[in-house]
Amino acid sequence: MTDRSLVDRPRIPSVPADDREPTAGSRPLGTEPPLVPLGPVTRASLGPPPPTDRVRGWVVAIGLAVVAFVVRFTGLGAVTDGGTPVFDEKHYVPQAWQMLRNGGVADNPGFELIVHPPLGKQLIALGELLFGYDGFGWRAAAALAGTITVLLVVRVGRRLTRSTLLGGVAGVLLICDGLSHVQSRMGMLDAFSALFVVAAFATLVRDRDDVRDRMALVIAQDRVGDHALGPRLGVRWWRLATGVLLGLGCAVKWSGVYWLAAFAVLAVVWDLAARRSAGVERPWRGTIVRDLPPALWALAVVPVVAYVSAWWAWFGSETAIDRWTDSGPAFLPSALRALVYYSGEILAFHSGLTTEVSGEHPWESKPWSWPMGLRPMLYYFASGDQVEGCGTADCVSSVMLIGTPALWWPALAVLAFALWRVATRFDWRYAAVLVGYGAGILPWFANIDRQMYFFYMTPVVPFLVLATVLVMGEVLGPSDAPRERRQTGLLAVGLWVGLVVANFIWLWPILNGLPITQEMWDAQLWLPSWRAQE
């Protein structure tokens, strides 16, 4: 997408400068100042405003969320291991059930060390509370999380591209991604991680637009030059929401801290860019003085408070693991000392979870294989007498965690184009998506010996989708391009989206455990790396 849609806003009532430091939107009550023309810096300097078709935007987002709900919940509880959880569900589902029966905390010593924070398992427990201890019950919360993630991706895609059409395309792509589909139908933690990461990204982008709207008001009032550091921006509720969501993401899995660090840097860089675009005399110093202290509060202190609050049941338990240990830093209250000690035990477990110590897992993979999904995972497999309904005596039923190739295989080209746009055009949209994508994959290169799995990419998929949609926007062309150019671009984008949808439909049997023939099973496995290791 281009900046051709930028327009100057109408003149807005101004307030004469006084001796006070400017605050975005401040104006003495009861005054009626005269209209004054804008200076050389305008709202257009801060970037294009969001699209104005709000009703249509929400209709598209909610409509696609309904589609996602149907797709994610269809046959949700059908595949089980004789009525018990499959794959890593065996860790989290029983813990969630005990939390439900034990006041929100799991303390069964048979679990040994519980190695993730409690929030994700508490959310699984809510599904079990409503629907019972069966496949549907222990997967319902994850399926709902996957549905809400689709809604958020439509909204953030629309805000990034300033196009309701492309926002809708983002939703279709996420619905039709095999990894997101399967992980949203498992009683595991990663669908919740994805939800909180995407929600935090959405509120952060919303905060960026809000800051520019506040700056636009100051520009319109000709108050940018009232102070060399620029205006104070007031309370930024969207950024506070970002901090809360990131803290809750860490309360699902500690890997949320990667996005916490990345988004904090991104927020400060955006503040600096806003001050520079608004013509602030000293933007760097203004960012350090005006923006950095509240950013530290919103994106450092608030996430910690949100994270600790997720341990409410552990703090109130008499029997929770390590709750009453007396180890830990002496300067902390006893409850926090115990939490720090327990967290150290969890960290030690994860540090020792290496191939050398624990052996090689048959579906283990390394991060260099993740961008194109070269090593998927088999969650469930049954054949022979265990499976009926394919029309032959030799049926296969499987659930394979695999990204839809039509979306994943162009990933390297999409990411390369995004890097080129950042390097040559300083395009903030591509930079934001790359930051979200990189935060989910680059940290894993720091310890290659650790056991790693493809489902770690669950929170990354939405950023792949958004990057793909941004590229589709380039293919589509600007709205004022010649008619032939737009039609050609629309045809290309339509074919690309149609290929993803068709590919998803082809994979549907092995994403959902439907009975298929042995020949069909062999036809689904396109690459040697998709097969089990001998």
Image (tube, rainbow, N blue to C red):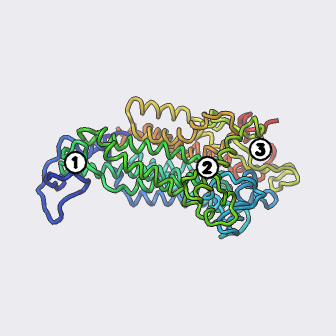
- Classify 10 Å Cα crowding around label 3: few (below 14), some (14-19), many (20 and above): some
Counting from the top left corner in percent of width and height, residue 32 is at 13, 61
Q: Residue 265, can we see it?
A: yes
Give how far apart the Cα atoms at labels 3 and 1 are.
62 Å
- Callout 3 amino acid: Trp
Secondary structure under badge 2?
helix
Query: Which of pointers 1 and 2 lies earlier in the amino acid sequence?
Result: 2
- Callout 1 amino acid: Ile
The residue depicted at 73 percent of the width and 54 percent of the height is 91
Give how far apart the Cα atoms at labels 1 and 2 are.
43 Å
- Which residue in the protein does label 3 denote? 521
- Classify 10 Å Cα crowding around label 2: few (below 14), some (14-19), many (20 and above): many
Q: Is residue 356 above or below residue 158?
A: above
Secondary structure under badge 3?
helix
- Callout 2 amino acid: Ser
- Which residue in the protein does label 2 denote? 180
Using the image, tell me which numbered label, if any, was put on residue 219: 1
